[in-house]
Amino acid sequence: MAVRCHADPVFAGSHLATCQGRAVAFVRYRVTMSDLFRQHGQGMMNHDLLSDQAREQPDGAGAPIFGAGTAVLDDVDQARADEYALLASLLITPPDSGSLARLSYLSDNSDTPLGRAHIVLAQAAASYSHEAIRREYSELFIGVGRGELLPYASYYLTGFLNERPLARLRADMARFGIERAEGHPEPEDHLASVCEMMSGFACNHFAVSHDEEQDFFKRHVEPWAGRFFSDLEHAKGAKFYRSVGTVGRFFIEIESEAFAMEARQNA
């Protein structure tokens, strides 16, 4: 995968990998995993996601989902994977006390908008209790009947749930051998699920080409994710999650710029 030439100063000094919350377990990958990643592929989230073969064999009970790719990652793509993983974990469930404690130590010495947003997120994690954030999460995303925000591609792109954007996403997931994990009723176009898949693409744990990753971003992330994160920043009920919205908005802007730059260079 090509290095994002603009991104080195954006991610320099960030320590996101140590701050991720518990596993999201939203999607799983239908491939056989290599022995290398059975041993060493557990640095990211989704430790409890298994391939079909691992589910069928007793000795695969503890195998991680990831391991489709074996290429050594550069620091930028690892940072991208960590950023997507962090956003996924915060969007699918409110962080528990342990996750908040780790997140409060998030450090970023890069003097960039995203770097400064990381520091604000760390400060927010230190300022709010798990119970307060749990109530905030419920008000924002669950509510009575519905929450203030609906983090689904179908809703943002059509105004309705379970529409054609979800069908298109499911078709691409099937093409890549990715499916929703058991026990998760949320539609796959929930932004947490989409971020989780982008994390897997970035760190080569889902076997897709760079062009396929770029196409996935253009089809399923860029058209709406930035708008959602901006809405989250300005949501009436957002306190802790306002900082999550800021991080997400800056990060999606960076990703959009990077993919656009690569497209121009390859034209």
Image (spheres, rainbow, N blue to C red):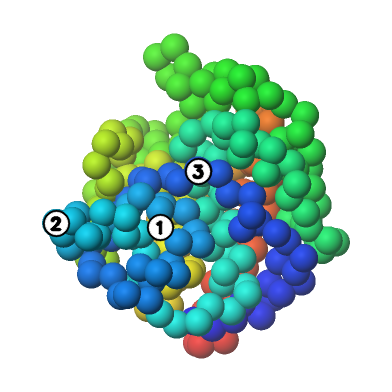
Residue situated furthest top in the rendering: 144
Front-most of residues 118 and 69: 69
The residue singled out by tag 3 in the image is: 22
* Number of numbered tags placed on the structure image: 3
Position in image of residue 2 (x %, y %)? 54, 83
Position in image of residue 190 (x %, y %)? 40, 41
CA separation in Å, label 2 and label 1: 23 Å
Q: Are marks 3 and 2 in contact (CB under 8 Å)?
A: no
Q: Mark 1 or mark 2, which is nearer the start of the sequence?
A: 2
Report whether residue 93 is seen. yes
Left or right: where 130 falls relative to 155? right
Q: Secondary structure at mark 3?
A: loop
Q: Which residue is at a point 38% across and 76% down the rendered structure image?
A: 36
Label 1 environment density (alpha carbons within 10 Å; few <14, some 14–19, many ≥20): many
Front-most of residues 250 and 134: 134
Viewer-nearest of discs 3 and 1: 3
The residue singled out by tag 1 in the image is: 197
Q: Which residue is at a point 57% across and 32% down the rendered structure image?
A: 96
- The answer to whether 77 is drawn above or below residue 27 in the figure is below
CA separation in Å, label 3 and label 1: 16 Å
Tell me the tag on residue 86. Answer: none
Q: Which residue is at a point 41% across and 52% down the rendered structure image?
A: 46
